[in-house]
Amino acid sequence: MVPIQYHDLFPKSKPLIACIHLLALPGAPLYKGDLQGIYDRALAETAIFVEQGVDALIVENFRDVPFYPNRVPTETIATMAAVCREIRNNCDIPLGINVLRNDADAALSVATAIGADFIRINVHNAAVLTDQGLVQGRAYDTLRKRN
């Protein structure tokens, strides 16, 4: 993932970024065993958002509650990469990745593997008390890995 400037990615002063909240992924307590359903829902949402003219998309594993505070399991990373690759293949607008709760390494890995344009990290610096406990940002690490 090559660092780019915000205004190069989003020329509008206030871009509209739509969020695709994936259905629960394999390994998550709410996973229903329907992997194809995850793909179908994500691609349907992608089509709707693109048709409506959003400026970018971001994909999150929002239904994988309760979240791991820092590192997600490998099945989450693998599934997100596979589903996000299909999303990438079906849209030509900027695409971002957010691996909840705060797995910057996984987000960078998925983004690099699928050619995403940006990542989001909920707690990038400082520390935040969350429902997963104290989550500490690791900007010192993430910024060194983005190149």
Image: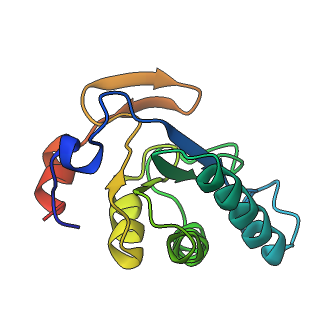
Q: Is residue 112 among what the camera can see?
A: yes
User: Which quadrant is the C terminus positioned in?
Assistant: bottom left
Q: Which residue lies furthest to the top in this view?
A: 129
Q: Is residue 61 among what the camera can see?
A: no
Instruction: Please give left or right for residue 14 compared with residue 39 in the image.
Output: left
Query: Residue visible at 73% across and 59% down?
Result: 28
**Residue 96 point in image, percent of width and height:** 42, 54
**Residue 23 point in image, percent of width and height:** 75, 56
Query: Residue visible at 33% across and 62% down?
Result: 108
In the depicted view, which residue is nearer to us: 50 or 22? 50
Instruction: Please give left or right for residue 5 compared with residue 33 in the image.
Output: left
In the depicted view, which residue is nearer to us: 131 or 40? 40
Task: Tell me the quarter of the picture where residue 136 sits.
Answer: top left
Visual colour scheme: rainbow
Query: Residue visible at 53% across and 77% down?
Result: 89
Number of dots carrying numbers: 0
In the depicted view, which residue is nearer to us: 25 or 14? 14
**Residue 104 point in image, percent of width and height:** 35, 53
Query: Residue visible at 36% across and 52% down?
Result: 119
User: Which quadrant is the N terminus positioned in?
Assistant: bottom left
Instruction: Please give left or right for residue 140 compared with residue 30 in the image.
Output: left
Task: Tell me the quarter of the picture where residue 127 sits.
Answer: top left
In the depicted view, which residue is nearer to us: 66 or 123? 123
**Residue 27 point in image, percent of width and height:** 71, 66
